[in-house]
Image (tube, rainbow, N blue to C red):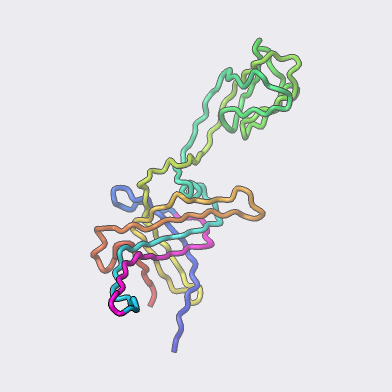
Amino acid sequence: MSYEFLSLQGATHLARNIDGQAKILRELGNQTQLKLSIESDKMEKYETKTGKRQKVFEMTKTRGVNLEMVLDEQKREDIALAFQAQMNSTQAESVADSIIGDTLEVGDVVKLDGFNLTDITLTDNADTPAVLGQHYEVDAKYGTIKILDLDTLVQPLKASYMTGETETTVLFTLPDDAEYYMLFEGINSTNDKRLALELWRFKPEVQGEMDFINEETGEISINGSALADPQKNNDPKLGGFGRIVYLDK
């Protein structure tokens, strides 16, 4: 008698399906969980003649395939996927004489419109320059100004600066119909045998989760379902949803 046990690890890849064709694969970050599950909804009939209400018929009405992923490596593209977002780049631009407030008090912190700021100047309503370190201090990375002293300044205050280039993840900018070909390249650590999991049309759910404060490294969760591919549905080698392929005998 021989036993065969599975202790799987491996890499997951996604490729955006555009016009029904899988494109270039992108490898996701390190994962602590990848779980495939199936579900079905059944219709049942019970007889009413014997008094025992015995089940006499059963029919599967619907079938579904679900996928759950937990990643402990936070690639920017994976975070974007978890939050139904697309990655965008913002270019540097100049902002001149933007009014930041006319009722400011000492200690107030004002957020300017941008990040990675440079060439920051602050003037009052009479165009008198405010002095950095005396009247205000700046956190250029986060684009904030803290008011230190207003005694010689006439409000409203105006800020001029240059914003920096950034990469942004804008929530809910991924199209609702975005779906992916998914390939898991698995290896059984008990015997080094390989297997693959393919899903033709993986559609992420709008239920991404990410911890922004952590005692250790954080995790992100990406869940979704597989949609049936009508073109593959009648092919016994492929199946409508996907397949598990054993690569080693």
Residue at the farthest top position = 126
Q: Quadrant of residue 197?
A: bottom left
Q: Is residue 120 left or right of residue 242?
A: right
Which residue is rendered at x = 52% and y = 26% of the image?
A: 93
Q: Nearer the viewer, residue 213 or 41?
A: 41
Which quadrant is the C terminus positioned in?
Answer: bottom left
Q: Quadrant of residue 137?
A: top right
Vertical comparison of 199 with 119: above or below: below
Please state the extent of the stretch shown in magenta in the rendering: 27-50
Picture mark count: 0
Q: Is residue 4 left or right of residue 159?
A: left
From the top left corner, tell me how far across and down residue 85 is, in percent: 45, 43
From the top left corner, tell me how far across and down residue 184 is, in percent: 42, 62
Tell whether position 44 is magenta.
Answer: yes
From the top left corner, tell me how far across and down residue 64 is, in percent: 36, 62
Which residue is rendered at x = 38% and y = 62% of the image?
A: 65
Q: Is residue 129 left or right of residue 54?
A: right
Q: Considering the whole magenta stretch, tell me its main secondary structure.
A: strand
Which residue is rendered at x = 25% and y = 58% of the image?
A: 230
Residue at the farthest bottom position = 1
Vertical comparison of 147 with 13: above or below: above
Which quadrant is the N terminus positioned in?
Answer: bottom left
Which residue is rendered at x = 38% and y = 72% of the image?
A: 246
Q: Is residue 69 left or right of residue 225?
A: right
Tell whether position 48 is magenta.
Answer: yes
From the top left corner, tell me how far across and down residue 88 is, in percent: 46, 38
